[in-house]
Amino acid sequence: MPIPFATVIDLQAALNKDRIDGKKIGFVPTMGALHAGHLSLIARAAEENDVVVCSIFVNPTQFNNASDLEKYPRMPDADIHLLKQAGCDYAFLPSVDEIYPNGKQLLDIDFGALEKVMEGEFRPGHFKGMATVVNRLFEIVNPEKAYFGKKDFQQLAIVKNMVKQLRLPVNVIGCDTLRQDDGLAMSSRNMLLTPPQRKAAPLIYKGMMTAQEFIPFHTVEAVKELVIRYIQQSPLLKVEYFEIVNPETLQPIQNWSECKEVQACIAVLTEGPRLIDNVTYFTI
Ligand code: PAF
């Protein structure tokens, strides 16, 4: 069973002992409602470190929509049970006051163009809130390595950029997206899909994957239209954005010749949860 901690002081006391014993700390930040994708991050952290900390904290400052925050699934007992199987040592379940003892002040950091596109454009303020909590959690846990899923491709780029700007002593590791058998990217929000929405949702990954065979014979714009049309064959799915971007700068490409590998990133609205996903295309 992972040892559960609710306060910074108790968690840090345990981690300080571990550090004195020369143990390496791996960290997996989550918002709970854990699924196999999270567990794969914990398993990797357990392979590469002596002690694994997993935080479960639904961070209010990264939600730009009150109903999304309210509906976000919370199931701490089931989560702790899953953490036990995955090899987690410490589960950190802090209160909002523990994370934000001086009020919800946001980190003053400029991510430039990285935060102006895609999620940054459609979820204003999201990345400032996300970076604030990740920075606070890094400060509390002080891990050698921290693990993030590549499903949140832009989040991963922003966390890496924050670590670079603030010179934080942590190695940020991106881990591959886990998918259901029908291709749907694993996400805590999937459990909020109705059965018909769940049935339609695999069109997102299928649509993005069909595009690879059209590259480079169609223009970037034409491929984008094809993918959007494919996904929107279901009336239950509405593409909020579909961008094909340079994986380093996250800026949309105009021509395939700009990069050998590009990242296709999507957000899809259902009448329930909003789903995001991304895949890599090879352009030559
Ligand atoms: O990806 C998430 O679950 C969250 O954005 C994170 C990194 C735990 C910060 O709240």
Image: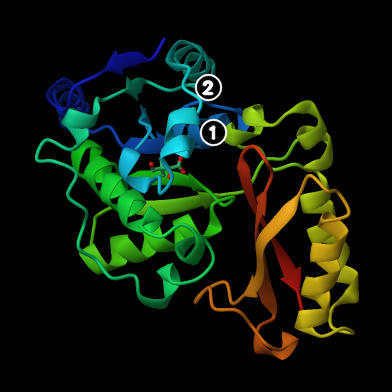
Amino acid type indicated by mark 1: His
Q: Are marks 1 and 2 in contact (CB under 8 Å)?
A: yes
Q: Residue at x 24, y 66 (%)?
A: 109
Circle 2: element type: helix
Amino acid type indicated by mark 2: Ala
C-alpha gap between disc 1 and disc 2: 9 Å
Q: Residue at x 47, y 46 (%)?
A: 148
State which image quarter holds ligand 1: top left
Number of numbered callouts drawn: 2
Label 2, residues with CA under 10 Å away: few <14, some 14-19, many ≥20:
many
Indicate which disc residue 93 carries: none
User: Which quadrant of the view contains residue 278?
Assistant: bottom right
Q: Along the polypeptide, which appears first: circle 1 or circle 2?
A: 1
Locate the N terminus by quadrant.
top left
Picture coordinates of residue 192, whole percent (x, y): 63, 29
Picture coordinates of residue 9, whole percent (x, y): 12, 25
Residue highlighted by disc 1: 38
Residue highlighted by disc 2: 86
Q: Which sits in the foreground, 217 or 58? A: 58
Residue 150 drawn above or below residue 201: below
Q: Which sits in the foreground, 135 or 270? A: 270
Picture coordinates of residue 264, whole percent (x, y): 68, 66
Question: Please, which residue is most extreme toward the left here?
Answer: 102
Query: Left or right: where does residue 93 sit relative to residue 118?
Result: left
Residue 64 drawn above or below residue 178: below
Which one is in front in this view, the residue at disc 1 or the one at disc 2?
1
